[in-house]
Amino acid sequence: MTQPFTPRDYQRAIWQFIADHDRCNVWAGMGTGKSVSTLTALDGLSMTADPFPALILAPLRVASSTWPGEVKKWSHLQGLRLRAATGSEAERSHLVHARGMDIVTINYDKLPWLVDFLGPLWPFRTVIADEATRLKSFRLKQGGVRAQALGKVAHKRVRRWVNLTGTPAPNGLRDLWGQQWFIDEGQRLGRTFSAFENRWFATKRRPGQKFGGEVVPQAHAQEQIEAALADCTITVRAQDYLDLPPLVENTIEVELPPGARRHYRELEKEMFTTLAGGHEVEAFNAAALTMKCLQAANGALYIDDQGTWKELHDAKIEALKSVVEEAAGTPVLVAYHFKSDLARLQRAFPHARALDADPATVASWNAGRIPVLLAHPASAGHGLNLQDGGNILVFFGLWWNLEEHEQVIERIGPTRQAQSGYNRPVYVHRIVAQGTVDELVLARLKTKASVQSLLLEAMKGRRE
């Protein structure tokens, strides 16, 4: 059943900005209604210009469900003809060539196929890049395969382009160049990524270090980059418009048992340890060592390339049990990272359910029928509304990806709680093993978040 759309002030601002700018960035926080605002803008443009056919790029679940769902939901969008080209190759081929179609959605993974399939017959006048940080790896002569494919048509065949994201710089300012190239072909931030880096970044090396080092922004970088993007970017944050419930964040520290601590220390110092039963665990480089240390902090180590793992401790399991008990029947969303985490959690919580692609799982969670929902941030991020099911989130393990971290929080976060009429705080617990790489990851996530928060706040201020 369709619903009438009563736009909020910031949603009006979004669609007006899109209508006024052929190529632009919409940096709107999660849950602010970017999708319906964008569709409303396209629908309005069709009265005076011709933005169709339009292509919407999105993660798979969002392309196949969220965007089609928006058109079905709102009464003022019923005239839009939108289809998802996320199925088999035969189904995709039919849809992208279908006459009379206003909008086609497709997942990023299919971009190389799409560009190759259409060739010189590329029909799309408008491209909407949802979660545009998927394009951050673009480089003129290298970078991600998907972004490279899209780069071939971005400026030669596409008149209108909109980048949508709530996290434009999840890993720092260097994430911006690839996304912005699709807006202006390098006019604002530099024609090449090298030119961008040379202008605003420097390599920081330790004393005596001759090669390598960390690339860091120069003192003037943030201010100048903000100024360069201000005319083509609108920033919307829900907290500036809504009376949001509080976000209560809590770090639950656990201590590794002596045996697990010994294995952890051996890994850190020797990049090698031997578990009970003679199982040898070795890390061959720094990246692999970080992975092994995170596994050990969570409670299990992989012992071969086939995915076999051995449990080290259950300290985090016990901490999670306390959270579930204190919730007293309120459903709890648990974010895990490794498959070994999932297996151990399912063993410890027999009534838990793993989030999968079945829409019935989300429906059951939102109906309150799942006491513990286990979700990997990579699959629970974009386009899912989980706020009806509860307001408690536990990070069983941590990972470096800030965007995924923030996305999974916002599935039940304050913005979505407020928009659904719930006046209840959101509790986010992070279980951290003391004296492990967990602490480094948490500190790093906070650092990245501060850079992004400064960027969003400054861009909002410049437009005002």
Image (spheres, rainbow, N blue to C red):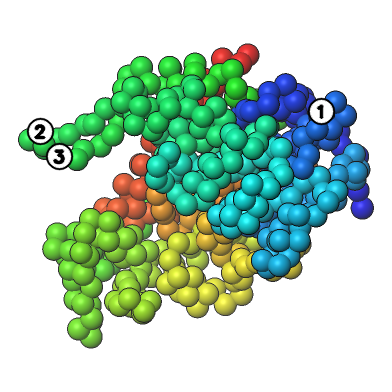
Q: Would residue 47 be found to the left or right of residue 18 on screen?
A: right
Task: Please name the residue that numbered disc 2 is placed on.
Answer: 207
SS at circle 1: loop
Rendered-image quadrant of the C terminus: top right
Q: CA distance from mark 1 to mark 3?
A: 53 Å
In this picture, is 331 found above or below 227? below
Can the viewer see residue 215 in this picture? Answer: yes
At a point 40% along the width and 49% down the height, the residue shown is: 400
* Residue topped by disc 1: 49
Which callout, 1 or 2, points to the residue nearer the camera? 1
User: For mark 3, does the 10 Å Cα neighbourhood hold few (<14), some (14 to 19), or many (20 or more) residues?
Assistant: few
Q: Amino acid at mark 2?
A: Pro
Instruction: Where is residue 199? Give x, y as percent.
Output: 33, 22
Q: Residue furthest left?
A: 208
Q: Which of the two residues, 239 or 348, is positioned nearer the viewer here? A: 239
Give the amino acid at mark 1: Ala
- Helix, strand or loop at label 3? It is loop
Judge by depth and name the residue closer to the eye, 321 or 83: 83
Q: Is residue 179 left or right of residue 308?
A: right
| Amino acid type of the residue tagged 3 in the rendering | Phe
Residue carrying label 3: 211
- Pinpoint residue 229: horizontal percent, then vertical percent: 53, 21
Give how far across and how far down residue 2 sits, in percent.
91, 48
